[in-house]
Amino acid sequence: MTILEKLYTHAQERPNATAFRFLTEVHDDGDSLTDSLSYKELWQSVCQVANFLRSKAEPGSCILLFYPPGLAYIKAFYGCLLAGMIAVPLYPPRRNANSDRVLKVAQSCQSSMAMTEQSEIANVQACWQQQNSANLVMNFLLIEDVPNIAVHMQPNEAINPALPAFLQYTSGSTGSPKGVMVTHENIVGNVQHLSRTSNTGSRDDVFVNWLPLFHDMGLVVTVLWPVYLGATSVLMAPATFVQNPQTWLKAISRYRGTICGAPNFAYDLCAKKIPQELLPELDLSTWRIAFCAAEPVRSDTLKNFYDYFGTAKFNWEALNPSYGMAEATVFISGAKSESKPKILTLDKAELGQNKFVVCGDSANSSTPGSANNLTTELVGCGQVPAPHSVKIVDPKTKSVLPDGAIGEIWFSGPSVSPGYWKLPEVSAETFNQMLDGEAKYLRTGDLGALWQGEVFVTGRMKDLIIINGVNYYPQDIENTAVMAHPALRDGACAAFTLESHGLDALVVVAEVERQHFRSVDKAALIRAIRQSVMQEHSVNVDHVVLLKPHKIPLTSSGKIQRKQTAILLSQGELDILAQADAQPLQDYIAPRTEVELAISAIWAAALKVDRVSVAAEFSDVGGDSITAIEIAAKVKSQFALADMTVEQIIAFSTIEKMSEFVALYLARRAKKTQVNDTKTHSAPRKRLTI
């Protein structure tokens, strides 16, 4: 049964049940103005749009949809499907923003027709004319022009379920965007997968969400899944949530929401921005599925959200870390309803060598543990029940890896798209991969592991940072960087490498909060980033770049575009607030003693620089873990510190501190030697940490 047949059935059996409710205005007191559609009203509107489109275009035509958040978009989307046409959801372009991408999408899908509404037509046409260097012909249709007449249509008039229902264009960082073909069969396969995996979903559920409807997660989870179930979906504009996060939780409380979710950042924003005095007004006890997806899920985010909203009757078991992508329609894996999140503590050094080593008893834990500088926490993204399947594969040999081994995540099942629109060669590299003669698999491009049947995602293959043979996941470095100083914007950071003198240099680009970027000490920010990353990951940041807010390029779904950021930086096209290479961020202070002079020479030689200030922090002058070991070994050898370990020596982060320790050590050794030349004395015991 297709999604259209489901919609038709609900319209016949439960005509007055509310299908969608859109909150047009949301006030601080929780009151709101709404537009709504019953299932009968929705089906009638969909039939009218389909009839209108059939008079304008041939079946199989691609129709660009330019709609702001609201019910008009939902009518137009389902109308395209019923007309046998292919919907192409896009956000209305803004001048000097995403209008160039719109042109590329139109060229890709060879569309000559677009639908929008009266409030957007002038802007859409102006942006189109501004960017239409290829002189493409585009006919713009208004939903207000759809005749308000009775139209009787049957869902079985729609085209073959194996043909595309819509194109979900990926927000590739460079080049032309690729349109993922999502068929009518894919839609049903994925919403069934959602219900089967979460062990939930019925007509009694209430979805309350603010996700962008043109994006895969918002479209599938808030527009398609509720209709398949015959449930009610309450919607609000993304801007409403971002400007005032309490509107989302108030709506969940008011409408007794059961299935509601967002990316990781939204949970952080709620815990940070919603005042404590509001908590007694919230009742989140009905919230059974709080899915968290679309970006890496952080264990501290889950814990902080639960700790803060537990008094509002939010349940820890409601948190549902999930994983997916457009090429799989949207959803790949997730936890069952009312099951606790799975959180593992991993050995950080082993993870850097692509090994999945679980520490202590975290294998049986469902709460955040006590990660330290030597470990890291990873949140599980649930399981994958049949008929879908996940395998972890060696990307080079294409052999299946055992549980606990890190490799590329491959996914198969009814949710997998047939490929990219009009790109058979590119599609062949990603889709329809065979494993030992088994079903065709999708190569996700993500790295991860299976552990006790649970999917753990470690990062993107193409974003993986490799320095001195050690793997670093950019999201880990980015999280550490933004937490280094309160003036840095959470979630607005990009870590990547650029070639410098034949080597890969680590670069961190971070945005500064609007209220701080004029007054904050930029050198202090840069120093804080370097020191935090060095302390947490034992790797030096070669170049730090600070930007004003909203300057890092994002995908249409709000994800950081690391590759595009690197390109803009290389081309000098970033609006830089401040930047610094790995060098002392303070005045040079020369050596004052013989020990300082000797150790300064060792540091300078290892760092390949002419001189180093004795007060400069190791992380500020380009030091990394390998350089630290080299320096410590030379200091130990030159000063005959036989009973000192390298780890103890490199605990001193400046030449000045290291020299003070060495001088004291030498003085005590000389004094003891005078007392008894034949007796070996140990150095003063001192507990030192890196």
Image (tube, helix red, strand yellow):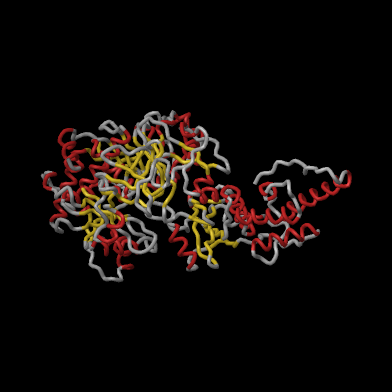
Question: Does residue 125 lie above or below 415 as drawn?
Answer: below
Instruction: Please provide percent x and percent y for residue 379.
Output: 44, 40
Q: Which residue shows up at 47% across the image and 58% down it?
A: 552
Quarter of the view holding residue 333: top left
- Quick check: 500 above or below 31? below
Residue 525's spot in the image, x, y percent?
60, 54
Q: Is residue 52 left or right of residue 307?
A: left
Pick out the residue farthest to the front: 678
Which residue: 58% across, 47% down? 536
Viewed as shown, does residue 87 lie left or right of 310?
A: left
Q: Position of residue 356 (x, y in %)?
A: 46, 43
Near-viewer residue (449 or 248): 449
Q: Is residue 463 left or right of residue 483?
A: left
Which residue lies at the image location 53% right of the left edge and 59% below the top edge? Answer: 507
Residue 116 shows up from this direction: no
Q: Quadrant of residue 414?
A: top left
Residue 227 percent across, percent down from the top left: 24, 39
